[in-house]
Amino acid sequence: MAMRRIIVLGVLTVSLGFFGCDQAISPMPPGVTEAVAVIHPTTGYTATGTVTLKQESGMLRITVAITGLSPGQHGFHVHEKGDCSGGDGKAAGGHFNPYGTDHGAPTSEVRHVGDLGNITADANGNASVVITDKMATLNDGPANVLGRAFIVHAGADDFVSQPSGAAGSRVGCGVIGQR
Ligand code: CU
Ligand code: ZN
């Protein structure tokens, strides 16, 4: 009798454990409102910093703090894949473009979801910028940027050249994760 009770308890414990794990590995939990990306330089560059994201009602607030840039404008986008491996940023793929549209400026009606425009570094190479965007989001749906990557470019995004604004080399990369 005692043995039988122990076996039943054991089976119950294993079942609970199994279902507990199953829940833990389910896709992105709903209601994520804050995320962060740590920007690391690609080979030969020094771009370093953080980008924090906060979903507010109807817009995403993106706070950029990056150092080690050349002074001036740098294209700044969400790229499709959350992969900064390989040393050149190319594993992150193209601009995040879930609707299959042309590249544009953040203010353009037609743009990629990932088109956040340019960030400007001061004479010391520091960029401290707050961007608010109505397309990129942490809300559920096709425009959700969680798990994708920010790329900082060597040059400015001209907002016209296809498919990516001719912003040049990828100097920094950071994967966007839940905070
Ligand atoms: Cu880019
Ligand atoms: Zn684009």
Image (spheres, helix red, strand yellow):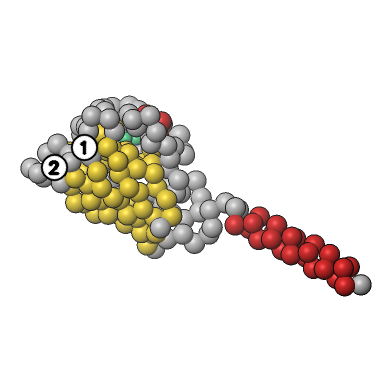
Query: Is residue 49 depicted above or below 34 in this figure?
Result: above
Q: How many marks?
A: 2
Left or right: 93 with respect to 28? left
Under mark 1, the amino acid is Thr
Q: Amino acid at mark 2?
A: Gly
- Tag 2 near tag 1, CB within 8 Å: yes
| Residue toward you, 153 or 15 | 15
The x, y position of residue 166, in whole percent, is 26, 27
Q: SS class of the residue under badge 2?
A: loop
Position of residue 156 in the picture relative to residue 96 (left or right): left
Q: Kindly state the secondary structure of the residue where label 1 is placed.
A: loop
* Number of the front mark, 2 or 1: 1
* Quadrant of the rendered image holding ligand 2: top left
Given residues 102 and 147, the one toward you in this image is 147
**At x 44% / y 49%, what residue is drawn?**
146
Instruction: Tell me if I can see residue 110 in this picture.
Output: no
Circle 2 crowding by C-alpha within 10 Å: few under 14, some 14–19, many from 20: some
What residue is disc 1 on? 46
Which residue is identified by label 2? 125
Residue drawn where x is 30% and y is 44% of the image: 39
**Percent x, y of residue 80:** 43, 37
Residue at the image position 32 percent from the left and 47 percent from the top: 38
Q: Position of residue 82 (x, y in %)?
A: 43, 40
